[in-house]
Image (cartoon, rainbow, N blue to C red):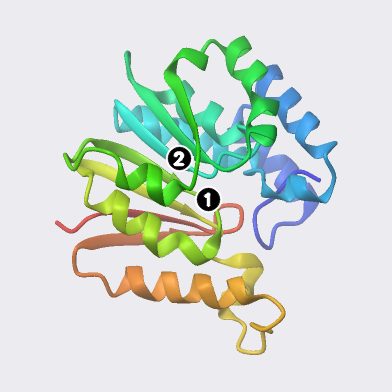
Amino acid sequence: MTPKGIGLSANVQEYLVAHGAGIDPIAQELIDVTVELGPISGMQVAPEQAAFMTMLTRLLDVEFAVEVGTFTGFSALSIARGLAPGGRLLCCDMSDEWVSVGRPYWERAGVADRIEVVIAPAAETLAALPEEPTIDLAFIDADKRSYKAYYEEILRRLSPKGVILVDNVLWGGRVADPDADVVENPDTANIREFNDHVVADPRTAQVMLPISDGLTLITLAP
């Protein structure tokens, strides 16, 4: 099943995508191939989120982007399509098996040469980057217990115009449910802790949007 916005009915989701997302045949094929993988396909970003990320990348005139958590490559495809001429995207992931699903679609879309993939623990990849503030856009969508670590490594390298996007910040609504079982689903507590950390951080400004499963946009404080 293709991921959809939290709280949206199927018909509203379909209408929303038809009137704004603009999913082309290559992206649709990648969505379909990912859905065929079964329940794990829920890790894929929703079409409207992908379209938003492409537009934001273009608006920011992004020259260097970082993605933490690539899965089958739909989000990477979306970011790469919005990069400025000569721009590049660094993808951090632990599974070449999943990333390999998306590579043919990057090739067909003509963006493969803009994407570098590093298969290694993302915290190590980020820590090895130069300290200069060169990251114009970052997308965090990986293991929830490490969100804060990824955020800190990216923040110290964020350019003055840079934006950090963080996925799954509503976590199916469980972050706002006082009865949510954090023993059975410890990532509920992990995301709550991360959200609290960001909103209390005087270094940044942020807005949380109900796009897909919740998307927080973070910039340096004005």
Q: Which residue is mark 1?
A: 141
Q: Earlier in the sequence, mark 1 or mark 2?
A: 2
Q: Do callouts 1 and 2 mark residues in contact (Cβ within 8 Å)?
A: yes
Q: Is residue 132 above or below residue 213?
A: above
Which quadrant: the C terminus? bottom left
Q: Is residue 114 left or right of residue 7?
A: left
Task: Pick whichever, 101 or 110, lies toward us.
Answer: 101
Total numbered badges shown on the rendered structure: 2
Residue type marked 1: Asp
Q: Residues within 10 Å of mark 2 (few under 14, many from 20)?
A: many
Q: Is residue 217 above or below residue 158?
A: below
The residue depicted at 65 percent of the width and 42 percent of the height is 16
Q: Which residue is mark 2?
A: 67
The residue depicted at 34 percent of the width and 68 percent of the height is 198
- Percent x, y for residue 178? 60, 88
- Percent x, y for residue 21? 60, 33
The residue depicted at 66 percent of the width and 26 percent of the height is 100
- Percent x, y for residue 23? 65, 27
Q: Find numbered disc 1 in the image and state the secondary structure of the residue it sits on.
A: loop
Q: Residues within 10 Å of mark 1 (few under 14, many from 20)?
A: many
Instruction: Kindly report the distance in space between the C-alpha atoms of the residues bearing marks 1 and 2.
Output: 8 Å
Task: Pick whichever, 35 or 24, lies toward us.
Answer: 35
The residue depicted at 47 percent of the width and 62 percent of the height is 146
Task: Pick whichever, 189 or 19, lies toward us.
Answer: 189
Q: Find numbered disc 2 in the image and state the secondary structure of the residue it sits on.
A: strand
- Percent x, y for residue 85? 32, 14
Task: Pick whichever, 88 or 177, lies toward us.
Answer: 88
Residue 27 visible from this viewpoint: yes
Q: Is residue 44 above or below residue 222?
A: above
